[in-house]
Amino acid sequence: MRRRIAAGNWKMNGMVADLAIVGEISAAAKAASCEVVLCLPATLIRAANNLVALPLGGQDCAAQEKGAFTGDISAPMLRDAGAGFVILGHSERRALHGESDAIVAAKVQAAWAAGLCAILCIGETEAQYRAGETLDVLAAQIAGSLPEGANARNTVIAYEPVWAIGTGLTPTVDEIARTHAFIRARLPDAGLSILYGGSVSPANAAQIFALADVDGGLVGGASLKSDSFIPIIHELEASA
Ligand code: PEP
């Protein structure tokens, strides 16, 4: 049985005042039959961990364990703050911070060494999608950013078409089904979960989660409010 996970990515959003939302999501997650994870800004992880039993994650970590890397946060630091997960290779990190597959792979290894589960993001840009290169891009990202040793406990894959993130656009369900099946065939362990990410909402979650190779969602904007994230959690439960 693969893990079914609803993961929220708060990106660079959230203040201490927003911990009430974490409390509401945690209350809903307690009764849920799927895993619910919130990947918060690093500044909120400790406070959220003191408040709720919900699994928490960071959104990036350094490849190094410690040292002269001003502004960076290491995987052991995230773990120390109460995180069990970390998003790595998000398209915003790849595009805005120049993270190559090799850098992402090194970060995944750092996450594993600290006992974190890596949520490894892969996905094609709009230009690559239009050029029909989606599957080649995904194959290259899997080969380059997923180190040997991935298993269902230490890694979750998130397929996130870059052009679907924050745009309200999504691939068709047939395209998502085909892409997830392609990814699954390239993973080293049949037990690895593959989440879909990119404009998941309460309105489209049921259709997407019903697909055989979709094991949940990585949700950005809709995870910032309990009244949009909790219905998505319920759709994932209902799709089991
Ligand atoms: C994301 O940033 O990982 C994401 C999927 O964002 P959104 O749900 O807002 O498209």
Image: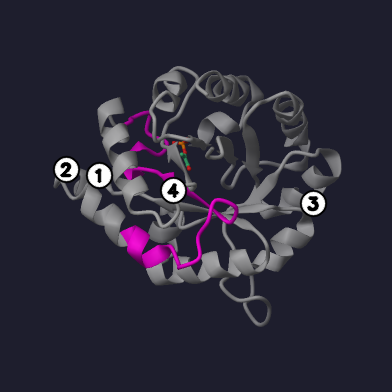
Tell me the magenta residue range.
141-170
Mark 1 — residue?
126
Q: CA distance from mark 2 to mark 4?
A: 30 Å
Q: Amino acid at mark 2?
A: Arg
- Side (left or right) of 95 relative to 22: left
* Closer-to-camera residue (107/3): 3
Q: Is residue 213 magenta?
A: no
Mark 4 — residue?
190
Q: CA distance from mark 1 to mark 2?
A: 6 Å
Mark 3 — residue?
46
Q: Earlier in the sequence, mark 1 or mark 4?
A: 1
Disc 3, ligand 1: is the CB inside 8 Å? no
Residue 48 position, x and y percent, is: 78, 43
Q: Amino acid at mark 3?
A: Arg
Q: Amino acid at mark 1?
A: Glu
* Closer-to-camera residue (40/32): 32
Q: Mark 4 against mark 3, which lies toward the viewer? A: 4
Q: Are marks 3 and 2 in contact (CB under 8 Å)?
A: no
Disc 1, ligand 1: is the CB inside 8 Å? no
Residue 54 position, x and y percent, is: 74, 39
Residue that sits furthest to the right in the current view: 50
Q: CA distance from mark 3 to mark 1?
A: 36 Å
- Side (left or right) of 208 relative to 76: left
Mark 2 — residue?
130
Q: Earlier in the sequence, mark 4 or mark 3?
A: 3
Q: Earlier in the sequence, mark 2 or mark 4?
A: 2
